[in-house]
Amino acid sequence: MKRTLSCLILAALFIFTTDVLIAQENQQFGPGVYETLERSIDLRNICVPNPKTEYEYDFDISFEKNVNKAIERERKAFKTDEIKKYSHPKYYKNPTEYAQKIINALRTAYSGAYDINVTNIPLDAAVVNASQNHSCKMVSCNEFGHQSSCLGSVKSRVSEQVGEWGSCFNGYSENIAINTLTSVEKAIEWAIFGMMYADVDCCNNGHRENFLKCTYNEDWVMGFGYKKGKYSFGGSGRSYDAWFMTWDYVKKNNGSDCKWDNNNGTKECPEVLVSKFKSLTLDGNSSCTSINIKWSMVRENNSSQFGVYISEDGSSYTLLENITAAGNDENTSYQSIYSPSGDGIKEISVFIKSKDKNGSFISSELKTLNLESCQSKDEEKAQPSTPEPTPPAQEEDEAEEEVVDETQIIIAPNPADDYISLKNIRYGVFYRIYNSSGRPVKYGIYTSEINISRLSSGNYYINADGKNGKFVIQ
């Protein structure tokens, strides 16, 4: 990954109060933020041990692999095999949900070895607003910190959204980070990894404690806010585009006048007309050999492209294709064609990710199509028979074609009905079949033959092993 500047700054702030009535101006700030009315809490006594050395983030591998490499080291350092493998979230609607799901997945990974009873800390609309306000204020105030005369404080930001400290909430913690990566997804990943595994020199593992804290229970909710803005690193005088990020955890107290789960708006942020989905539909032909994926936008002012993500197992998603956004203000429709990769697939799940011009994103709802419902419409169709051996004369023609052009895939039979076999490619390579319009309609791993009985008649192209071929279905 090429980066002219790669900066990550973290700040986790703890505030420990021994007096319930402590005045705001007398609070003392340490390496993290934590404040509670519970006098007996010991801030540095968390259930999960802290790493003594920092781990460097490897930009050449995925976030999930980076975390699992760090976990493997911690299994040895902490002398426990009970830390689970980290499982990365597969589907998420927006950066806020993405940041929340990663933290909850990390809490789940460590819960088997340590006393983390609550692994799923839910998002709360009011706390999300408080976090978003702080990220926006850091940009407008040109400050990176937890509180100041311009930024306010964690307590004031949350109070503004939900009500009074002591009656509406009685505990909070906060992590903030800033970095210069282009994509907000990558910015979130690098920041979280740094907080979890490279926090010793920065904040004595204060961020990690806020993320993995065992004292969080069912009364705690969280928020995440992010904003892109300019920042000058190291007093250079030159400013760079950077993501300002805020994680807030708040302990709820259900007073009658409290405004929990209310979306009061992000007052510190200028309004941005983000892209918005109107609909997403999946339509299959009679046997579901071809799935027409259609979606429409209410507006797409900020969209640069749409990513079409497919899952055939309900767990792992593959990017089918990227489609460039038209850039219209409203009522724009798109479509993509998909062919399931095998006969044993029972359903597919699909979502569309609108990738914004500034590096953010928003995803559509998740849609699932039961392929068996399509196949039931076609029960009377005869099962495809095993193709007859290729006549010797055909093999001779193919041999001549092989000699003519080694870069071409040799396809037999051609024209074809139900199955095709490929020559001049390696066993086990990935193949993709396109229709005459250039749309991908089927893909998979080649073994001995490909079932094409569900494709319509017409001309098709196939790509595999760096080679191309053309065939006709009768």
Image (cartoon, helix red, strand yellow):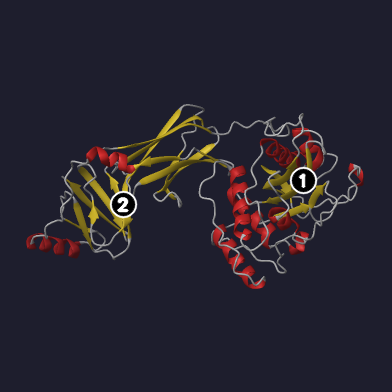
**In-front residue for pair 146/396:** 146
Cα separation, mark 2 vs mark 1, equals 49 Å
**In-front residue for pair 118/264:** 118
Q: Are marks 2 and 1 in contact (CB under 8 Å)?
A: no
Instruction: Work out whether 79 lies above or below 424.
Output: below
How many tags in the picture? Answer: 2
* Residue 139 picture location, percent across and down: 73, 41
- The residue labelled by disc 1 is 172
Q: Which mark is residue 344?
A: 2
Instruction: Work out whether 277 lies above or below 338.
Output: above
SS type, badge 1: strand
Q: Residue at x 38, y 45 (%)?
A: 348
* Residue 290 picture location, percent across and down: 30, 42
* Residue 24 picture location, percent across and down: 89, 42
Quarter of the rendering occupied by the C terminus: top left
Q: Residue at x 42, y 44 (%)?
A: 349
The mark that comes first in sequence, 2 or 1, is 1
- Crowdedness near tag 1: few (<14), some (14–19) or many (≥20) residues, C-alpha within 10 Å: many
Residue 183: in sight, yes or no? no
